[in-house]
Image: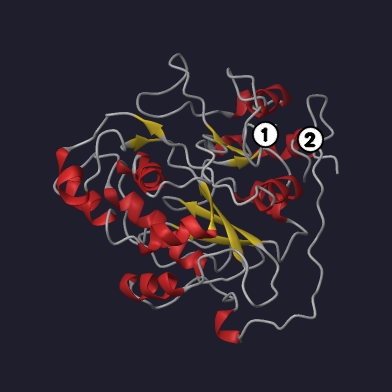
Amino acid sequence: MTTSTASFQSLYFPFVTPSPSAEPSPPASLLAPSSAMHNMTDEELFRWASTAPRLDGTPYHRVPKVAFMFLVRGDLPLRPLWEKFFERHEGLYSIYVHANPSYTGSPPRGSVFHGRFIPSQRTTWGGVTLVEAERRLLANALLDLGNERFALLSESCIPIYNFPTVYAILAGAGGASFVESIATPARYRPLFAARNNISVEQWRKGSQWFEVDRALAAEAVADATYFPTFRENCAGERFCVVDEHYMPMLASVLGWRRNANRTLTFADWDPKRRTGSHPRTHGAEEVTEELIGRIRRGGARGNCTFNDGASGVCSLFARKFAPDTLEPLLRLAPKAMGFG
C-alpha cells in the first residue's frame, strides 16, 4: 500500500481490513454507543470504565479500533481535514471530543464528529484539569470494547499519513505504547515521596500527547493511588503543568516495559521558532510539501530508526497548525499525505 504520491519518502505497510467471524458477538450493553454524550457523573463513568476488560482481545469477535481523542477548547478548525482522513474507514476508528462546557457549537449532522462530544469540565492551561480531561476521554473510550489503541490529539493537530498507514502502525505496534518519558528532577516535590514513595529517580517528564494500548489506558483510569497526589500537588497553584508529568510518571512507576518512550506527535520546539512555553505554530504560508516531508523525517533529528513497534516512522501526527492552514492542507493532502 502506498501511503503517499509525494516525491519524498513513501512508506509501505500491510493493511488488511478485519473480516467477519463466526465467533459470538458481544452483548448489546457492551457495544459502542451511537452518541458519546451520556448522563453519568465522573464517579459513575470511572467506575464503569474501571470494570471494562483491560487487555486487548475479548471472548467476543469485534474489529479492533483506534480511539481518536480530541482535547480542545471549543471548535475544531481543522475538522474538514480530519473528515477527509477518516473517509471510507468506518468501523476502524472511534472519535471522542472533550471541549470546555461553555462551548455550544456542534459539527454538522453529516460529520463524523457529530455526536462525539463527551460530558466535560472546564480546563485551564498548566492545571491538573488537563489531566482530568485526559482521563475522562480515556474512560469514555474504554467503554467501547472495540477500542484497542488510544491517541490523544488537540484541535491544532493534523495527520501526516493517511488512515490505513496510521491504523496499520498503531494496530500493529505489538502492544507498544508511545509515552515520552524522560528522567528529570524538574517540578519534582517531596510530596510525591511522602504520599506514594516516588523518588526523584522515578520522576519523569514528556509530551502530553500520547498513543497507548488498552492496558495502560485502563491503568490511568483506574489509578486511585498516584493521581490524587497530583491533584493535591496542584491545589491552589495555577500552573503546575502536570500534563507533562502524569502519564510519563505513571509508565515509570508501573515499570511499563511495553512503552516505546517517545511520542508519535511532532512539535517544533526549536528555540529560534518556538513561542515562550509553546512549540511553533505553523501558519498558512508554511504549509508546503517540504514541511510535511521534514516533519516525517523527524525535523532536525533526521533519524527514524527505533527499537519499537513503529521503527522507520518518526511521527504520525503533528502540531501546532493554525486555523488558516486548513485550505492549503486540504490542497496538499492528496499529494503529501495520501488522502483527500
Front residue of 219 and 301:
219
From the viewer's perspective, is residue 91 above or below residue 122?
Answer: below
Amino acid beneath label 2: Leu
Taking the spot 80% from the left edge, 80% from the top edge, the residue there is 22
Q: Is label 2 in a helix, a strand or a loop?
A: loop
Q: Position of residue 40 (x, y in %)?
A: 38, 77
Question: Residue 250 placed where, x, y %?
Answer: 37, 48
Residue 231's disc is: none
- Marks 2 and 1: CB-CB under 8 Å? yes
Q: Position of residue 330 (x, y in %)?
A: 71, 40
To which residue does mark 1 refer? 313
Quarter assignment of residue 57: bottom right
Q: Is residue 190 left or right of residue 305?
A: left
Is residue 114 at all visible to an observer of this figure?
Answer: yes
Closest to the observer, 28 or 189? 189
Question: Marks 2 and 1, how far apart in space?
Answer: 9 Å
* Residue that protrudes farthest toward the top in the picture: 272
Q: In what quadrant of the picture does the N terminus appear?
A: top right
Give coordinates of residue 35: x percent, y percent.
55, 73
Q: Which mark is residue 11?
A: 2
Q: Secondary structure at mark 1?
A: loop
Can I make out residue 103 in this image? no
Q: Amino acid at mark 1?
A: Val
Which residue is more in the foreground, 61 or 319?
A: 61
